[in-house]
Structure formats: C-alpha cells, structure tokens
Amino acid sequence: MHISVILAHPSPGSFNHAIAHAADEVLKLRGHDVLFHDLYAERFDPILHAGEIPRDAATSPEIGAHCREIARADGIVIVHPNWWGQPPAILKGWVDRVLRPGTAYEFEQGDAGEGVPIGLLRARTALVFNTSNTPAQRENHYFGDPLETLWKNCIFGLCGVQLFERRIFRVVVTSSEIQRRQWLEEVRQTVDTYFPTAKPPA
C-alpha cells in the first residue's frame, strides 16, 4: 500500500517528529511504500495563489507532485501539534493547495460549487496524531475540540475517506520520558492496527 505521512512541526527534536518517525518505521516494517513529507524541512510554500483556485488551473511542479501522491495514497497519516485549536499554518496551506478540486473532491455536473462535494481520494483510512498542552477537560469544555471536527468532518469526510482515527497526546510539556515512550508505543500499535502487513501481489 502507498501511505502518505505528513508531518508539520518546525523543531526536528519535537515529539511530533518522534511520532512521525515511529509511524514511518512501522509502515516500512509492514512492507508499505511510505511517502514521507516533513513540510518544514522541505520548506513547503503554504500560500495559495488566486490563479490556483480553479479546478483546471495550472499548478507548480511541487504542488503537482503532492497532488499525484495524495491521489494514489491508500492511507494517510497526519502528525501536528494543536496550535490555537488549529494545525500549523504550513499544514493548513498544504490542505488548501493539495486537497484541491479534481484531486480530493469534485461537484456533481451542473453544481456550481454550492452543493456537497463528492470525495475523490483513494485512501480509505486516515490517522491523525496530535500533541497538546491543554488538558482534555478544558479542551472539550471550553473549546469543543475543534481539531476533531476539522479533520473528521470538514476535510477527510468530504474527501471520501471512510475510516478516521485521531489520537491526542497530552500534556506534552510536563510529560516524562516514560510517558513519551508509552505514547510512541501507542502510535506503533495504532498504525499497525490500521495498516497491517502488506499483502504480496496476487
């Protein structure tokens, strides 16, 4: 299977990096073809230009490559911190530029864009791993956990991904080394559950 792993955290020593690399290791161990993108390390340009918005617009070679990869992915793994109840801007820009019409969704013929889009992504499973420094009770009571709605309903649900799982690790800033090792083991087990050993071609 082709699995896209998208990491968005500026610090190479972050726990987000540890999560992404743990997922990458398990996927490769299980025989999957991993398409790994560290958006900050690659200096991904998150700015959506007006000329890119139409479905038939020309895109840069970089964006075209990202679109082709996500279109052929059998599964998707996203790793990012919770910043202000949102993904980092670089990841939001990746969503804006890569999950574009004709790649991730389309509208029925005669629909000018006012209706509900039809999902086009081949991937049937998406995993999102988040880190947070906000306790669960405060996150849910005061903020309503906006990341769950964003990824599950506003993005993957509309792009045709049927199976969605999100795990949150918190509070990272006060976590111990033992706790982080336990969290990484949870990451490995989750990835292994949703993306088991790849079956050889028939």
Image (tube, helix red, strand yellow):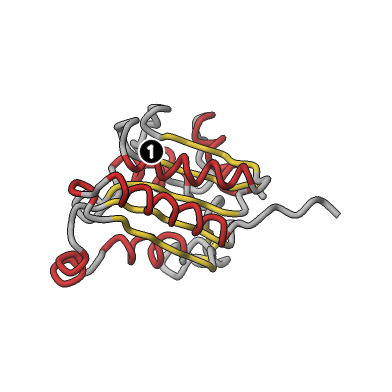
Please state which of residues 63 and 8 is positioned toward the viewer in this rendering: 8
From the top left corner, tell me how far across and down residue 150 is, in percent: 34, 61
Please state which of residues 3 and 96 is positioned toward the viewer in this rendering: 3
Q: Relative to residue 63, is residue 180 depicted above or below? A: below
Q: Relative to residue 118, is residue 75 depicted above or below? A: above
Q: Which residue is mark 1?
A: 17
Residue drawn at the location 65% of the way across and 46% of the way down? 32
Examine the image and state in which quarter residue 151 appears. Answer: bottom left
From the top left corner, tell me how far across and down residue 146 is, in percent: 26, 63
For this view, does 3 lie left or right of residue 115? right
Q: Relative to residue 8, is residue 41 depicted above or below? A: above
For this view, does 199 lie left or right of residue 132? right
From the top left corner, tell me how far across and down residue 163 is, in percent: 52, 67
Residue drawn at the location 36% of the way across and 39% of the way down? 48
For this view, does 13 lie left or right of residue 134? right
In the displayed orientation, state which residue is furthest to the right: 202
Residue drawn at the location 33% of the way across and 36% of the way down? 47
Q: Amino acid at mark 1?
A: His
The quadrant of the rendering that contains the C terminus is bottom right
Please state which of residues 142 and 177 is positioned toward the viewer in this rendering: 177
